[in-house]
Image (tube, grey):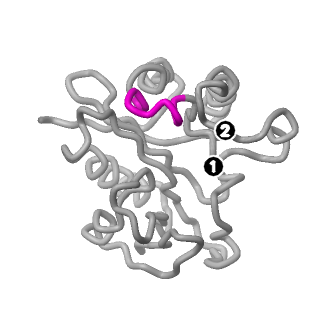
């Protein structure tokens, strides 16, 4: 199976939306309204509604995601197989994220370095275990070097390889990431670029 990876652009917004509308969580109704907004949830959005990713939040989160992608606030990469999106990774400059489930900035300071963060993967159910996340990770690492980042950082769950929307720790370790801390059940791992 040939997997191609493209950086998300406004021109690929319809592909991204189709993936989240139809495939990303087709097997998980609890997350069907996610649209990868969790890590961008800030006090302004919190005033409008509390964070949730179930079906009641689809319209709100979808609308916000569209705005964030168009403005460049949400960035990431799409994985394609035969012209169809089968995976997504939310990856951007560390400072672009308003909310994560733990305060990694305080525990792992950036010391003025340019750090690219990988916060979430979503792979269509039929393509899980087929190397989609690995293809995304490899592409992100190459882009991070080309974009002048000093480090790439990720936050896999410490003790649950099956709950892997942050990506499994084993995948990162195979690609040269080293564990540097653990925060609220997540491992912080980094790779020097």
Q: Residue at x 36, y 73 (%)?
A: 177
Closer to us: 160 or 75: 160
First along the sequence among labels 2 and 1: 1
Q: Which mark is residue 76?
A: none
Instruction: Please rate how many residues cluster around mark 1, counting C-alpha atoms within 10 Å: few if below 14, some from 14 to 19, many from 20.
Output: some
Q: Quadrant of the N terminus?
A: top left
Whether pointer 2 and pointer 1 mark residues with C-beta atoms closer than 8 Å, the reply is: no
Which image quarter: residue 108? bottom right
In the image, taking residue 164 as reference, residue 1 lies left or right, namely: left
Q: Which residue is mark 1?
A: 39
Q: Residue at x 42, y 79 (%)?
A: 179
Closer to us: 100 or 91: 100
Q: Give the x, y percent position of residue 33.
A: 57, 29
Residue at the extreme bottom of the image, as rendered: 180
- On whether residue 94 falls in the magenta region, the answer is no
Region rendered in magenta: 24-32
For the stretch drawn in magenta, what is the main secondary structure?
A: loop
| Up-down relation of residue 99 to residue 11 (above or below) | below
Q: Which residue is mark 2?
A: 52
Helix, strand or loop at label 1? It is helix
| Up-down relation of residue 138 to residue 154 (above or below) | above
Closer to us: 118 or 145: 118
Closer to us: 137 or 43: 43
Which image quarter: residue 45? top right
Helix, strand or loop at label 2? It is loop
């Amino acid at each position: 199976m040939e997997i191609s990876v493209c950086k998300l652009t406004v021109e690929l917004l319809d592909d991204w939306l189709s993936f989240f509308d139809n495939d990303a969580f087709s097997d998980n109704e609890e997350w069907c309204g996610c649209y990868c907004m969790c890590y961008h949830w800030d006090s302004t959005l919190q005033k409008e509604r509390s964070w949730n990713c179930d079906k009641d939040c689809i319209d709100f989160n979808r609308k916000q995601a569209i705005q964030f992608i168009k403005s460049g606030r949400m960035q990431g990469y799409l994985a394609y197989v035969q012209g169809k999106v089968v995976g997504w990774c939310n990856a951007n400059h560390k400072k672009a994220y308003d909310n994560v489930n733990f305060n990694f900035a305080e525990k792992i300071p950036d010391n003025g370095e340019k750090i690219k963060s990988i916060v979430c993967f979503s792979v269509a159910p039929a393509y899980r275990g087929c190397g989609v996340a690995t293809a995304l990770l490899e592409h992100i690492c190459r882009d991070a070097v080309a974009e002048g980042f000093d480090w790439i950082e990720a936050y896999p769950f410490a003790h649950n390889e099956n709950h892997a929307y942050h990506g499994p720790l084993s995948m990162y370790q195979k690609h040269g990431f080293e564990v540097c801390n653990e925060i609220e059940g997540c491992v912080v791992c980094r790779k020097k670029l």
